[in-house]
Each structure stands twice: as structure tokens, then as C-alpha cells.
Amino acid sequence: MKFSIKGTIRSIEYVLTFQDGEITGSPLALTILQYKACLAEAEGEAIGPIGGPYAKPPYLKDPVAAYILMTRVFTSIISYTGDKPPGRHSLPDGAIG
């Protein structure tokens, strides 16, 4: 599985890419991501889609948890490309979300 998220941090564009349990990208975005993941693991935060299933640490090896944490790095998201992480499903017709 591979996907990339492009976003801004303080008005500067950065990209983070998840591929088969490894994340690459700019050093600043990676440092922020690793900090957020470490903090979430230390606090025992449940990371996953609403209602589960929730990932177990290390969060950055799990595509859904990595996606959620990657989105928290950026002030705004510019684009998403690649595979759709499992557990990220659209709502059925008529559902309120």
C-alpha cells in the first residue's frame, strides 16, 4: 500500500508518503509526525476510524493510523494520492456523518 499527503506547515508545502509500513518525506514533516506518533503511543490514544478497529503501536506501521497522524501534521491538506487506506470508507447513501 502506498499513499502520499501534500499539505502546508506555516504556509510551506511538504509531502509525506506511506509505503508498506515506511514513511518518507521532508525532515521537518517527518519529525513532527514522529513526535505526534510517540505522544499518541505514550498516552495510549486509540487511533483508527470512528468505532474501530483501532491500531496497536507502533502506529506508523499501520496504514490507517499513519494516515490519521499524517493529516495531523499539516495546517491544511492540499492533496491526497495513492491507495485508499483500509477502514476509510465513505458513508452509505442517505447516512448523516
Image (tube, rainbow, N blue to C red):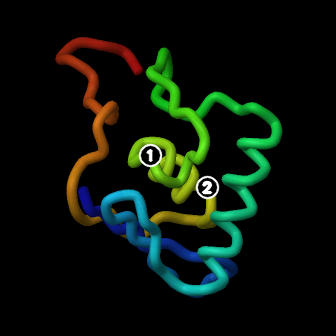
Identify the residue at image location x=60%, y=41%.
Answer: 57
Looking at the picture, how far across and down is residue 53, in whole percent?
45, 22
* Residue beneath disc 2: 72
Q: In this view, does 14 lie above or below 54?
A: below
Q: Which of marks 2 and 1 is nearer the N terminus?
A: 1
Q: In which quarter of the image is the C terminus?
A: top left
Identify the residue at image location x=53%, y=56%.
Answer: 71
Within 10 Å of disc 2 (Cα), the crowding (few <14, some 14-19, many 20+) is some
* Residue beneath disc 1: 62
The residue lying toward the viewer, choosing from 49 and 1, is 1
Task: Look at label 1 and name its amino acid.
Answer: Asp
Looking at the picture, how far across and down is residue 9, in whole percent?
64, 76
Looking at this view, name the residue that lies furthest to the left: 93
Identify the residue at image location x=55%, y=65%.
Answer: 76
Q: In which quarter of the image is the N terminus?
A: bottom left
Locate residue 81: give its quadrant. Answer: bottom left
Q: Nearer the viewer, mark 2 or mark 1?
A: 1
Lateral position of residue 49 relative to residue 90, left or right: right
Task: Look at label 2 and name its amino acid.
Answer: Arg
**Label 2 to label 1: alpha-carbon separation:** 15 Å
Looking at the picture, how far across and down is residue 15, in whole percent?
45, 78
